[in-house]
Amino acid sequence: MTTYDDRASLTDLTAVVERVRESVEGVIEGKPEVVRLSLTVLLAEGHLLIEDVPGVGKTMLAKALARSIDCSVRRIQFTPDLLPSDITGVSIWDQQRRDFEFKPGAIFAQVVIGDEINRASPKTQSALLESMEERQVTIDGKTYELPSPFMVVATQNPVEMEGTYPLPEAQRDRFMARVSVGYPSAEAELQMLDVHGGVSPLEDLQPVAHAHEILKLIEAVRGVHVAEPVRRYAVELVGATRTHPDLRLGASPRATLHLLRAAKASAALSGREYALPDDVQALAVAVLAHRLLPTAQAQLNRRSAEQVVEEILQRTPVPATPQQSGFGGLGRGVPAYPQQPPRRL
């Protein structure tokens, strides 16, 4: 397991994230919690689903995050006539070489932006399944590795469902987190008029971090220590969704893994070498809610999956103090878990 050499190395790594955060917030005004969650998913090697009403900046958030990192970026506009081969690629017969030549599709990029993903047919949506989970593409029996880091940022509109194809559960389960941008405050909207009233700041956005720096950040996040009580707490939260009477489908074991990885990334963003229950609590709604299916009775009672997760958080006991005496082999004492309410992302 990778561990931090010293405190200064962690400071250097978080400085890179700070540059990316400031770059994205220069385009997306008044939404620091949304930007933080996006960076958390990036460092946790996950994929992000941005779901909200039209015009709140879903695609702009995805583009700002992609352009802030010096890496390959491809944007896919999902439409009903989009084919799976447009995403994965296709083998074409070369007359001169008298052999098939593989032409990579749009998925062969480090950051892939899927705009309005629910407007494509289920057949086309399924072309993303292998790449999102295994980070590879299989065409004509041959497997092609995708570049690293690799992240899919997809957007969809939840209110215009006519002529769309809702993502199946298997597809939604591959997204580490779902975020809603929401309407800005009055002050943020006034600032947006000043910033975006002329030329869009997205056009002048320059990369502030390199892909190899992001890889170092990801490697550092893998070394964040998670004590046994925190791991057990995450398992209990996810397990409670499988037995809740208002849910006909609970969260999968993949959800537990995603919740743990996101908690480690959140701890690193906070400058800590260890994860706390606060990290798990703050991310539980974003990581779990989009995977859950409420029962018909819960829907009649207007009970959302987010409300169910909040209820589970209130009912599940929070661990007091881990039994380990150090983090990641550093031998430092373990502080007591903070008792203040967690910050929601």
Image (cartoon, rainbow, N blue to C red):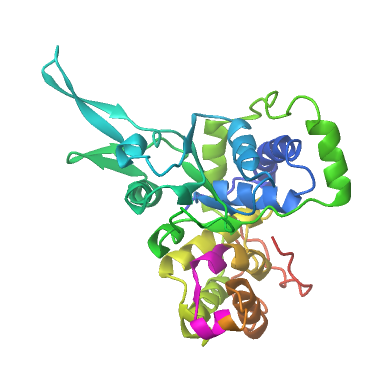
The reply to whether residue 241 is in sight is yes
Viewer-side residue, 246 vs 37: 246
Looking at the image, is 120 positioned above or below residue 305? above
Q: Main secondary structure of the magenta part?
A: helix
Where, by quadrant of the figure, is residue 69 drawn? top right
x then y, percent, for residue 146? 37, 37
State the image coordinates of residue 29 (x, y, percent, origin top left): 78, 43
The quarter of the picture where the C terminus appears is: bottom right
Q: Which residues are magenta?
A: 287-299
Is 196 on the left-hand or right-hand side of 234? right
> Residue placed farthest to the bottom in the image?
245
Q: Residue at x 89, y 47 (%)?
A: 187
Nearer to the camera, 63 or 227: 63
Camera-side residue of 28 and 81 = 81
In this view, 190 is above or below 161: above
Residue 99 percent location from the top left of the image: 13, 22
The answer to whether residue 326 is above or below residue 147 is below
Would residue 202 be found to the left or right of residue 197 on screen?
left
> Quarter-wise, where is residue 320 in the image?
bottom right
In the picture, residue 170 is in which quadrant?
bottom left
Tell me, yes or no, whether the highlighted magenta stretch contains residue 144: no
Q: Residue furthest top?
A: 96
